[in-house]
Amino acid sequence: MQSPIAFPALALFGLLTAPLAARSASVPSPLSLKSDISVLFNNDLDPGTVSGRPSVLLLSSPHTHGSASSACAVLGETLLPDNTTFIKDNLVPLLRFQEFERNFPSSQKFWIASKGPVCQTVDAKGDVSSSVVCLGSLPVLCTQSATLGAAAKPATSFTVQSKNLTITGFRDQASFRFFGIPYADPPERFTYSTPFTGNTTLNAQSFGPACVQTGETGTSENCLFLNIFTPFIPSPGSRTPLKAVMFWIHGGAFTNGMGSDPTFDGAALTSRGDVVLVTINYRLSTLGFLALDDGVTNGNFGLADQVMALDWVREHIAAFGGDPNRITIFGQSAGAGSVRALTASPQAIGKFAAAVPMSNLAGINFAATYSFYFTIPDNVAKVTAPLLESVGCDLEEAEILPCLRAVDAQTLVNVPTASKFLVVDGKFLVTPELVLNGTGPVARVHTMMGFMRDDGDPFISFPAFHVLIHRQQTTTNLTQALIDVQLPTNVTNNPLFPEPKGANATINTFNVTSNVNTDVEFRCLDQSTAFSAINHDLFESVWFYEFNRSYQIPGFNPNAPTCTPPATAARPHGDPELEYFKCHSGELFYVFGSLPADTPFRDEKDLPFMQRMVDIWASFARTFDPNPSTAFLEARGFTGTVAQLAAEPAWEPATRANLAGRPMRELQFESVMLPFGQQEQCAFLGFPLDFFG
Ligand SMILES: *[C@@H]1O[C@H](CO)[C@@H](O)[C@H](O)[C@H]1NC(C)=O
Ligand SMILES: *[C@@H]1O[C@H](CO)[C@@H](O)[C@H](O)[C@H]1NC(C)=O
Ligand SMILES: *[C@@H]1O[C@H](CO)[C@@H](O)[C@H](O)[C@H]1NC(C)=O
Ligand SMILES: *[C@@H]1O[C@H](CO)[C@@H](O)[C@H](O)[C@H]1NC(C)=O
Ligand SMILES: *[C@@H]1O[C@H](CO)[C@@H](O)[C@H](O)[C@H]1NC(C)=O
Ligand SMILES: *[C@@H]1O[C@H](CO)[C@@H](O)[C@H](O)[C@H]1NC(C)=O
Ligand SMILES: *[C@@H]1O[C@H](CO)[C@@H](O)[C@H](O)[C@H]1NC(C)=O
Ligand SMILES: *[C@@H]1O[C@H](CO)[C@@H](O)[C@H](O)[C@H]1NC(C)=O
Ligand SMILES: *[C@@H]1O[C@H](CO)[C@@H](O)[C@H](O)[C@H]1NC(C)=O
């Protein structure tokens, strides 16, 4: 029912908006909207309450009232309804945050839905003003109906133009998403990838295939894709500040993994952390790392792919709201090994501002190969030669590559000695390790690094952990178990490595071997890395951590149930405050805030801890300080994290002044600063703090 006053006004707007409406069949873009656009979402990471917290779309350029409602219509949405509950609970912190970021003055009004003929605006205090005179140009708030994790559909499609690329992604409740963007041309086997030159109109609404690997279907050699999650897309010429970029390099032993793994979904980091997240694929196994001694096929193809992806991001990320001068590369396990290698790589130095290697492997056994790089001749002798033999390509030099190119891709990654090692190729890696005594190339960047308290647990007695765990007759024999760990020294009956006297003899033994293995594969040399880098003043900053709370990802839990807390009557899914092993990959759900909706919080601390870890990781990317600013958190309404941080001492950077004191953050519900762990043990095992000089 329309009042007489409204009639002429509507007729007028109808005329004004006709051109825009006519275009509504095509996919909207910041160009067609003539505005920056943001998804604003209060993400508390609780899947149980997510439907009660719908997000909104903000068009920040001034619109007349008529063009405001048609802009929302072009997006398949409407002007935001005047809903008092929603405004008070959800909208106020979102707009307050916009003001905190100085995107708008504090008195700014935004168009929302009219009440009958009366135009309405809202401000960051939640005050709704009405006027029958719908004059003025204001930023616009539209509804945002796509739910969390919703797949792309025409109504939520969105196009971004970057240089000569036109890329169509979509939005969900938390962010804009652009999946499966090719950052390189389909690679030719055993050569470096080259920049993308294909069709410049890209449909980026579903993930590209993962790189060829064991245990996955639907993989492809044409796999050099990246994915972008962003809360904000600027219009051309926008003056809204760009956001920090987090560039994720997945783990998986250089043989497995993919950027599209839902554990690495960007919903939490983008909406809660206010950063742009990029996740990438890179070639794996033999297809990523084969080296020959022909002087040309120098390996490191997977590492070179990572650099190619970084180049793409530096060139294009501004169009997706990301700041190319504020890129944090981060990765876990082989992803951390990649971050470490990029930190040493003349091809990558200067292309990122910060680095976060999480649970880097270094020390003995297979862990050594992540941080100490083979020479090509060594790699050829130990890895390539048996590989060539098993695929029938041990031929004259000139025939090797043609032969290998004819072998089925799956066969190349299934062979027992598949390639998976970084090598000193003279281009991407020019030193046999990240040189930490000041005599080699090192990216001078901000760093945050650390490990899981029991990172070594899933790898003990590799490659024969089955002997240790599954054949009960050997599990209680510590002497045998330690031999299986292949230590460089004998730690049996050594008071530095006491065997606990608990009721379960298997667990007692396991405790010692897991501990020793964590030392010799993670802790000792990760601590030594920080120690030497600080002493030689190589990095802008070093923030060091050890996780002492974990939530094991179901996809990687080799020594179950050791990585899971014991269940009690009160905590049937396990009580994380009891003792258990805090294993490799047990931080990923927390850092990405990606605990799946069907995976329970085990106690009342899991959710706030996860919120805090997302806030910490994003804070590091935004400011190079993992202590989120109280002003930021309060503007966003993240009062839970504010309260938690107030209850614990600040995270201090590791510096020369505290290296002998408490340089390490123990990340647990009540986090504390601690000395580096197991220093005497590390020294005994051959990995003293000054190992790297
Ligand atoms: C107002 O918003 C709240 C969520 O904040 C929602 O639960 C409620 O249904 C909305 N009311 C109306 C009338 O749409
Ligand atoms: C797009 O631009 C890139 C350089 O950024 C260039 O290499 C490529 O050839 C261009 N593609 C087309 C189709 O113009
Ligand atoms: C490029 O891709 C678009 C969208 O998928 C398609 O419509 C167009 O035909 C393609 N152009 C060429 C030259 O393949
Ligand atoms: C620095 O460390 C490298 C190993 O990373 C070693 O080869 C070199 O000899 C060391 N140089 C000095 C001066 O200690
Ligand atoms: C434990 O293992 C060691 C090394 O294999 C072996 O010599 C020893 O006999 C074993 N002890 C027992 C009690 O089985
Ligand atoms: C290791 O040393 C202990 C004594 O410290 C000894 O009992 C044990 O036999 C030694 N084990 C091996 C394998 O040498
Ligand atoms: C000891 O712990 C292991 C690993 O959790 C378990 O498999 C085994 O059943 C336990 N043994 C006893 C006697 O409880
Ligand atoms: C680590 O967490 C366990 C509970 O899982 C707790 O018993 C232990 O005291 C914590 N360690 C430190 C150093 O606080
Ligand atoms: C391993 O044993 C030590 C004592 O030697 C104990 O402090 C620690 O809690 C044990 N770890 C686990 C996971 O039970």
Image (tube, rainbow, N blue to C red):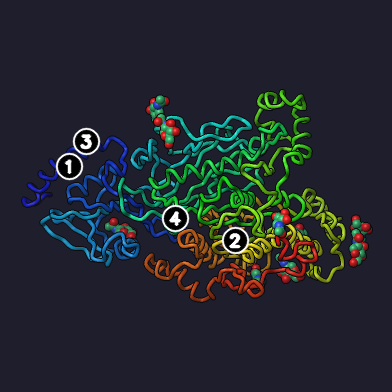
Q: Is residue 152 above or below residue 660?
A: above
Label 3 crowd bin: few (<14), some (14–19), many (20+), radius 10 Å: few
Judge depth for marks 4 and 3 and give the one in front. 4
Q: Is mark 4 within 8 Å of ligand 2?
A: no
Q: Ligand 3 is in which quadrant of the figure? A: top left
User: Could you tell me how far apart the alpha carbons at marks 1 and 4 are, in whole angstroms?
Assistant: 36 Å
Judge depth for marks 4 and 2 and give the one in front. 2
Q: Where is residue 407, by image quadrant?
A: top right
The residue drawn where x is 17% and y is 50% is 64
User: Could you tell me how far apart the alpha carbons at marks 3 and 2 are, in whole angstroms?
Assistant: 58 Å
The amino acid beneath tag 2 is Leu
- Rendered image: mark on residue 538: 2
Residues marked 2 and 1 touching at CB (< 8 Å): no
Q: Is residue 543 above or below residue 294?
A: below
The amino acid beneath tag 1 is Thr
- Rendered image: mark on residue 22: 3
User: Could you tell me how far apart the alpha carbons at marks 4 and 2 are, in whole angstroms?
Assistant: 23 Å
Residues marked 3 and 1 touching at CB (< 8 Å): no
The amino acid beneath tag 3 is Ala
Quadrant of the drawing holding the C terminus: bottom right
The amino acid beneath tag 4 is Ala
Residue 285 place in picture, x, y as percent: 66, 39
Q: Is mark 3 within 8 Å of ligand 3?
A: no
